[in-house]
Amino acid sequence: MTVYGERSIAARRRIAVLLTVLLVLLPAHPALAYLKFGFEIGSRSVTARWLRFPVRYFVTNRGVPGVSATDLQGAAARAFATWQGVPTAAITYDFAGFTSNQPGEDDGRTTLGFQSVPELDRVLASTSFLIDGLTGELLEADIFFNSAFAWSVAAGGERNRWDLETIAVHEIGHLSGLGHSAIGETEVGASGRRVLAAEAVMFPIALGTNDVSGRLLRPDDVAGISDLYPDGGFNDDTGSVSGRITKSGAGVFGAHIVAFDIAKGELVGNFSLRADGQFSIAGLRPGPHAIRVEPIDDADTDSFFDNVDPVDLNFRSKYYEQLVIVPRGADSGAIEVEVAGK
Amino acid sequence: MGRRVTPVMLAVWLLFEVAAAAQTGEGRVEVGGGVRWLGGTSYPRVSATETSLANGRFTLFDSDTRLEPATRVEARVGARLTSVLQMEGAFSYSRPELQTRITSDVEGISDVTLTDRITEYTFEGGITAQLARWSFGRLAPFAAGGLGYLRQLHDGHGLVETGQTYYVGGGFRVPFSLRRGLVKASGIRADARAQFSRNGVALDEDTRIVPSLSASFFVRF
């Protein structure tokens, strides 16, 4: 689940690395990875994650028209509670107070707040990180909400305004260490790409103004955060599917693989993250699953991958020919899905 | 105040009844084996959907899952309780196939059927009652009912599912005239059942009913 090797990080002690992930109207900006952020330090792979809990966060003491600083803090608290409420994940958060500091400042404080960045006319919000380049520990993560857009904290959403809690849930997913999910559908029209639907809060494109559906986590999000911070019986009660995606015998990098639970209808996805086409999807409910493989065609590839091997988009979508049985607390055993070029 | 049947009273009664049955000369214990055909069962359609604007649902594809008909190999042992009632237990083994048909893929992937071979064991206990009134020549009809434990292993045996079975039905025995040594009687037996099952590999918790037919050979001691 981890993309490694996006950035070359020298194996020196405690190198601060700044990363930025954006939630966009259209996917025009680079993000780092899918599901979990990862790094390659020499020959070692490191996953970016918080190691000290609760994660303490501050909220800026400035509001925007229609949303006061207190409203912002309330929406953020609800969004943090959504992630903290996942019973199979151990991460916790704590509101530390209001601050006059800006998000993005390298001040050791995890800060959420509004900033006006009109030049980022397709970016609703962004999360930046300070990471210990040796251990992968997240040291600080700041979220800015672009006040160039109209925001709302109304319970049922508000016409022509973006729901702050919905966007905060997505950004806090990044803050917690999750990358983007590709479980969503888009279409490209004359005015550009338009999102039709998504079944992951971590899909990189926001559904639309007045939409509050993103306040609720989906199975893909739950699997991701639980895989990163496993708690309860997560590792014992869920299982995984792993294998390779190949084309003409060679590995396919960047294929999107979705496991579909035929009993519950739940969708959990991941990518083939190595040049040999290997993939793994964790956090699956035990039982039979259908496996669907497709090229990334519902967002730009740089919404998921950053500076890695070329993503193969030249193959036809297909299903693995058999039901894959996910065992409890173990892996299905490697499968191989052979795809054909377009 | 009504009289209550205690377990001790019931056990004593059974002992007397079994002893009485043994004195009929038809054998007290029945051992048998044969095959049982079990009908297939379908589960509700499950669609892969995503959330669209205004909390609508966008369908990626549909899935229809079915447990195909199967033939069980069955072994059975029974004990006569009375001249009418027989208590019996059975073990069966089969390899039904779980099939999921994927259709209507939003990106136009051809419809496909995905399969999983199940290894199924059942352990059942029940009662048969002779229906002497409807005997016809050597054909001895009976009614049957019982319940059991279902153990299903998915392909590779990495996941075990368990469930319950119940059945009601009836059939007939046709005894041969063979009577040699310990063997008091032998013959063939056939029955038809309404077989109920719950859980196991089922995709939901509903109780399902399928037809079941069996043919077997039996020996009485």
Image (spheres, grey):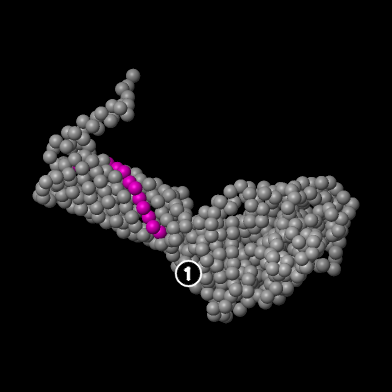
Q: Where is residue A271 in the image (x, y as percent from the top left)?
A: 62, 67
* Residue carrying label 1: A321
In the rendered image, the quadrant that contains the C terminus of chain B is top left
Check the residue under mark 1 and report the chain it is in: A
Q: Give the range drawn in magenta.
A: B118-130
Residue drawn 82% across the image and 46% down it:
A96
Res A33 seen here: no
Q: Main secondary structure of the magenta part?
A: strand
Q: Which residue does the image show at 80% across and 60% down from the upper left? A: A14
Tell me if residue B166 comes above or below residue B68 in the rendering.
Answer: above
The image quarter in which residue A19 lies: bottom right
Residue placed most toward the observer, A196 or A320: A320
Residue extending farthest to the right is A100
| Label 1 element class | loop
User: How many numbered badges does the structure rendering display?
Assistant: 1
Within the image, what quadrant is residue A145 found in? bottom right
- Image coordinates for residue B112, horizontal then vertical, percent: 47, 69
In this view of the protein, can residue B71 be seen by the observer?
yes
In the rendered view, does A107 fall on the left or right side of A305? Answer: right
A166 and A138: which is toward the camera:
A138
